[in-house]
Amino acid sequence: MTNPIHAFFQENGYYVAKGIYSPDEIRELEGDFDRIVEQLDASGETVRVRWTGAQMEKLKAENTELVHTHNVQIFSERWHRAFLQEKFLDAASAILGPDVILHHSKLFQKPSEKGAPFPMHQDWTYFPSEKDTMMAGIIHVSEATDEMGCLRVYPGSHKLGRVGGTSGQQASDFLDQYPLEKAAILEAEPGDVVFFHYCTLHGSMPNRSSKVRKTVLVQMHAGDDQIEPGNHHPNSRLVLRGWNHRATRGEANSKSI
């Protein structure tokens, strides 16, 4: 029998999974999300950031920022358990197959009225995997409307494969063909998860609303895939479901790839 989630993802390069987390689950996760942000702000580290570069300049969003950190599972047991939640992994497995490996996670908070945008880009340049199974799942802690700077994608653009110069920070004639304002708008409710392939062209507008947009992005790949040698990135290599077919003693002992 055809898997409708897999079929839609293969055709479009994304899938919106509705209601993966219940209101009670989101309430708990939002509490820990806010606690992480408070801890980051109190740390004295630089956690309020924004992208720079030629593509960002075109968006004319100089007075914007967002709060960002990697690997929320290091901060919070609740968030660790959220990545092991059955409905979340059922949706991820429908796309990746029975074996799901965590590469890393990221917290993004777009402040009200000045939340920073993300220029259109592909993600593969940051952590290329040998079989190109890498995808993200954005867990929506808050609602994400167009006014709040929700995700935008070009459906089917993952079929372009890896395109050079698409990190979204340098000038790019290719990216100029895919303006952010013309991309498909993927609004979401708290508890929804938006999955997208790492070659799918995606980005987001600034948050110009009076509400804070809160998301956690989970980067995952299939269990028979692995990151190409020589690419360094925060990476936990946690098995979320099934088996890691490419694990070695050396990799298990290393701090990063």
Image (cartoon, rainbow, N blue to C red):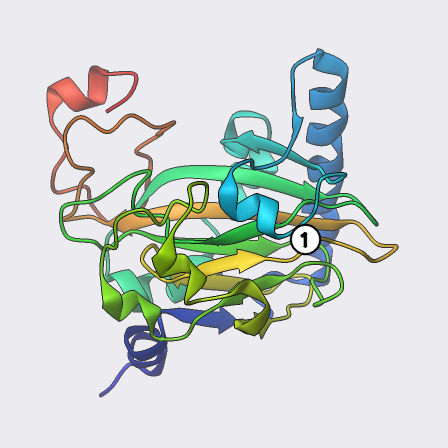
Secondary element under disc 1, as helix, strand or loop, is loop
Q: Where is residue 53? Give x, y as percent.
A: 51, 37
Q: Residue furthest bottom?
A: 1
Q: Is residue 241 visible?
A: no
On screen, residue 79 above or below 166: above
Q: Quadrant of residue 30?
A: top right
- Horizontally, residue 103 falls left or right of residue 20, namely left
On screen, residue 218 above or below 43: below
Going 31% across and 46% down the picture, which residue do you hit? 165
Frontmost residue, 219 versus 23? 219
What is the quadrant of the C terminus in the image? top left
Q: Residue furthest top?
A: 44
Instruction: Name the residue carrying label 1.
Output: 141
Going 59% across and 39% down the picture, which residue do you hit? 107
On screen, residue 66 above or below 4: above
Going 65% across and 25% down the picture, which residue do you hit? 47
Frontmost residue, 117 versus 247? 117
